[in-house]
């Protein structure tokens, strides 16, 4: 029985330990995962998506303008002292018999007591207004949808910017990591050479100055590695920042940067090229659509508008406010005596508004909007030229960087072979210590040049993808 308890305890212990180890393991990310995380957590993208939601709400708000507009009102009024009723005395007739007033003369103004109104009154009404036809409203619906489309295109452009920033930071981490491996390899190789030289010195086949030279080279390599480790930490932090990943949490970057990843066919890029692949061009197209709707809206403002309205309610009067709220105050439409009743009223109507002359304001508004449209159309020509130049620059930079990469790769291979042969000759006593150190320095220089060229080529590949609008999936380019 105790054995069962011990086994159970050990099982729980190891399972718990494994869970803790898994929980404490650093997050691992490939390039696609880095980009995905950034797109899901970027504040700029979050704000762009909020703008999309605002645009959707704006569309619904605009739709609501064309729905029935209903409002209700209710109120009570008590006149502590009613205003007088004014009239002129006419002995031959009149609404009020004033013949009994002492000293009154024909044509005199008389301020009589207001017996047409009781001191307290109450009213409750419901008003309904409905657009039947309004050209500006119809254009507004189209503009609201175009505004929504504009917010979507803006989000796409923001996505592209995030992808560029994250990808460049990711490649920087990969290149620096390869450089760190080179430091370890060079240190191991020079350290091995130092051991051999020390042994040769002890046996009288090498001078102490040869040992010192190699020791200096080894110390310099270790110092450079220490500095570069800090730079690598900074590049990782930059990647976290671009991803909006918590800076206090560890992260492990997966993947390797090599020529195969960045080697592409320019013919394939040119085969399906279209300006509409670019998010900035799509954004300009949407602005052009909105500007056309602005012109259309100004024309629509000159069209007649038709609307219907209705007003329904109840009203009553009473000598005092309490009478308005008596429990026996029924609703009657049959007339009768007594103020303590609520009587209904209603009205219906149709309004036709025909703009006739606005002092030529609409004419000049249309003229202004058309001129704005011309500016946008000029913007198409300008952005197309700018994109053409960007593509040419990106293509040339990519071609140059790939040529430089291949050249530096050959130089690195040659320098590695020279360093290997020089070391062998030195170990066999037919080479000098200075030749070995020079060969090691040349090898390190070519390695640095190679990875600089590799990083430049990767950046030029990103710029090439951006120039051709290939950074984002094709689905994001659909209207």
Image (cartoon, helix red, strand yellow):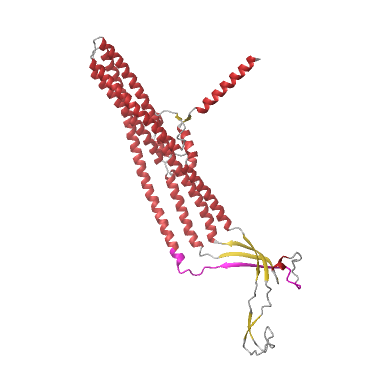
Q: How many marks?
A: 0
Residue 70 vertical placement versus 318 (above, below): above
In the image, farthest residue toward the front = 80
- In this orientation, which residue lies closer to the viewer: 353 or 387? 353
Q: Quadrant of the N terminus?
A: top right
- In this orientation, which residue lies closer to the viewer: 66 or 443? 443
Residue 415 vertical placement versus 367 (above, below): above
Q: Is residue 347 magenta?
A: yes
| Residue 171 in view (yes/no) | no
Which range is magenta? 335-364
Q: Is residue 183 magenta?
A: no
Q: Position of residue 6 (x, y in %)?
A: 61, 16
Rendered residue at 64%/79% (across/down): 85
Rendered residue at 51%/63% (across/down): 301
Rendered residue at 52%/52% (across/down): 145
| Apparent side of residue 123 relative to residue 160 in the rendered image (left or right) | right
| Apparent side of residue 321 relative to residue 175 in the rendered image (left or right) | right
Rendered residue at 34%/35% (across/down): 399
- In this orientation, which residue lies closer to the viewer: 99 or 438? 99
| Apparent side of residue 166 relative to residue 92 in the rendered image (left or right) | left
| Residue 45 in view (yes/no) | yes
Q: Position of residue 220 (x, y in %)?
A: 29, 24
Q: Position of residue 348 (x, y in %)?
A: 65, 67
Q: Position of residue 397 (x, y in %)?
A: 33, 37
């Amino acid at each position: 029985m105790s054995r069962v308890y011990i086994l159970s305890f050990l099982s729980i212990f190891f399972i718990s330990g494994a869970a803790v180890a898994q929980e404490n393991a650093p997050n691992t990310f490939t390039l696609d995962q880095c980009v995905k995380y950034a797109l899901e957590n970027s504040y700029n993208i979050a704000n762009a998506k909020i703008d999309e939601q605002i645009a959707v709400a704006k569309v619904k708000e605009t739709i609501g303008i064309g729905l029935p507009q209903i409002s209700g009102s209710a109120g009570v009024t008590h006149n502590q002292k009613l205003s007088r009723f004014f009239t002129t005395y006419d002995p031959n007739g009149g609404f009020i018999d004033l013949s009994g007033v002492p000293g009154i003369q024909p044509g005199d103004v008389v301020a009589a007591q207001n017996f047409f109104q009781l001191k307290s009154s109450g009213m409750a009404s419901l008003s309904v207004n409905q657009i039947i036809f309004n050209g500006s409203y119809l254009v507004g619906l189209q503009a609201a949808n175009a505004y929504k489309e504009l917010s979507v295109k803006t989000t796409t452009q923001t996505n592209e910017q995030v992808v560029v920033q994250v990808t460049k930071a990711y490649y920087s981490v990969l290149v620096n990591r390869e450089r760190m491996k080179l430091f370890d390899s060079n240190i191991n190789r020079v350290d091995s050479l130092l051991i051999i030289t020390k042994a040769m010195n002890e046996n009288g086949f090498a001078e102490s100055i040869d040992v010192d030279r190699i020791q200096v080279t080894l110390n310099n390599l270790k110092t450079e590695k220490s500095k570069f480790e800090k730079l690598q930490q900074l590049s990782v932090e930059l990647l976290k920042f671009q991803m909006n990943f918590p800076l206090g949490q560890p992260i492990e970057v997966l993947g390797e940067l090599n020529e195969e990843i960045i080697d592409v066919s320019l013919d394939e890029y040119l085969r399906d090229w279209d300006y509409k692949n670019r998010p900035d061009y799509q954004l300009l197209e949407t602005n052009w659509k909105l500007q056309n709707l602005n012109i259309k809206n100004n024309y629509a403002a000159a069209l007649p508008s038709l609307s219907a309205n209705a007003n329904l309610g109840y009203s009553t009067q009473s000598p005092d406010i309490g009478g308005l709220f008596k429990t026996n105050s029924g609703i009657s439409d049959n007339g009768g005596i007594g103020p303590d009743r609520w009587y209904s009223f209603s009205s219906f109507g149709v309004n036709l508004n025909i703009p006739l002359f606005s002092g030529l304001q609409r004419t000049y508004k249309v003229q202004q909007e058309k001129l704005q449209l011309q500016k946008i159309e000029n913007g198409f020509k300008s952005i197309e030229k700018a994109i053409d130049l960007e593509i040419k620059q990106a293509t040339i930079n990519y071609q140059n960087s790939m040529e430089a990469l291949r050249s530096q790769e050959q130089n690195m291979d040659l320098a590695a072979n020279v360093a290997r042969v020089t070391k062998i000759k030195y170990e066999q006593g037919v080479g000098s210590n200075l030749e070995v150190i020079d060969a090691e320095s040349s090898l390190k220089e070519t390695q640095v040049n190679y990875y600089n060229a590799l990083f430049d080529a990767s950046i030029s590949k990103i710029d090439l993808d951006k120039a051709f609008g290939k950074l984002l999936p094709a689905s994001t380019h659909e209207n």
